[in-house]
Image: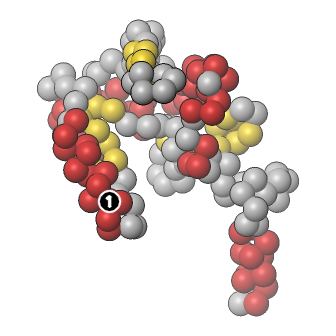
Amino acid sequence: MNVVYRPTKNALLAHVMHASFCRHGKPIRHDDIRTMIRALKHNEAVWYAPDQSYRNKGAAMVNFFGIPAATTTATSRLARISGAAVLTYFPERLPGLAGYRVVIGPAFEDFPGTDAIHDVERFHALLQAQILKIPEQYLWMHRRFKGLSADYPDYYGRDSRQRAGVSAAKSGV
């Protein structure tokens, strides 16, 4: 299985992650779209987490638990370009040392649709339902709600919006 990853800034952690991915599959850097598409066109499984905070080209603010979250719309584009089916993958840690249970959902029907944002909303609905079953197992550290306007609370305790305003005022912008 191909695993899409983003190297961390911590060199030791990046090495450990890459070594782990190599044990369980073939790692693909998050920005290596050509390799992802090539793998999908060869009918290989490609795992990636489209629920990460994402602000670059191809991102949209899509509600996640009722709060706008910067989200990639790449799943739709990858499916359209490669013709690959899109399935959900929900792991659950079992109590003690019993291991994991993994539920792989059926291929999304009518996917990709004509609207990538609607496609993301469909995925978010499934993800939210899974999270509500076992919320303590979701990786909330991903900071899905960063970069929001001042209309929203500072969910992470470091109001960068305020600092950005102060910096802009100091620079005369």
Residue sticking out furthest to the front: 96
> Viewed as shown, does residue 117 lie left or right of 18?
right
Question: In the rendered image, which quarter contains the C terminus?
Answer: bottom right
Query: Is residue 3 or residue 50 the one in the foreground?
Result: 3
Which residue lies under the disc numbered 1? 14
Query: Is residue 144 or residue 119 the one in the foreground?
Result: 144
Placement of 10 over or under 152, stated as above or below: below
> Viewed as shown, does residue 157 lie left or right of 5?
right
At horizontal 67% and vertical 23% (from top left) the residue drawn is 132
The kind of secondary structure element at disc 1 is helix
Residue 166 in view (yes/no):
yes
> Viewed as shown, does residue 55 lie left or right of 97?
right
Question: In the rendered image, which quarter contains the N terminus?
Answer: top left
Residue 41 image offset from top left, x and y in percent: 19, 27
At horizontal 32% and vertical 67% (from top left) the residue drawn is 11
Residue 8 image offset from top left, x and y in percent: 39, 61
Q: Quadrant of residue 83?
A: top left
Residue 59 image offset from top left, x and y in percent: 53, 46
Query: Is residue 98 or residue 154 the one in the foreground?
Result: 98
Q: Amino acid at mark 1?
A: Ala
At horizontal 69% and vertical 35% (from top left) the residue drawn is 63
Residue 149 in view (yes/no):
no
How packed mark 1 is, by other alpha carbons closer than 10 Å (few <14, some 14-19, many 20 or more), is some
Placement of 159 over or under 78, stated as above or below: below
Residue 56 image offset from top left, x and y in percent: 49, 54
Residue sticking out furthest to the left: 42
> Viewed as shown, does residue 115 lie left or right of 150?
left
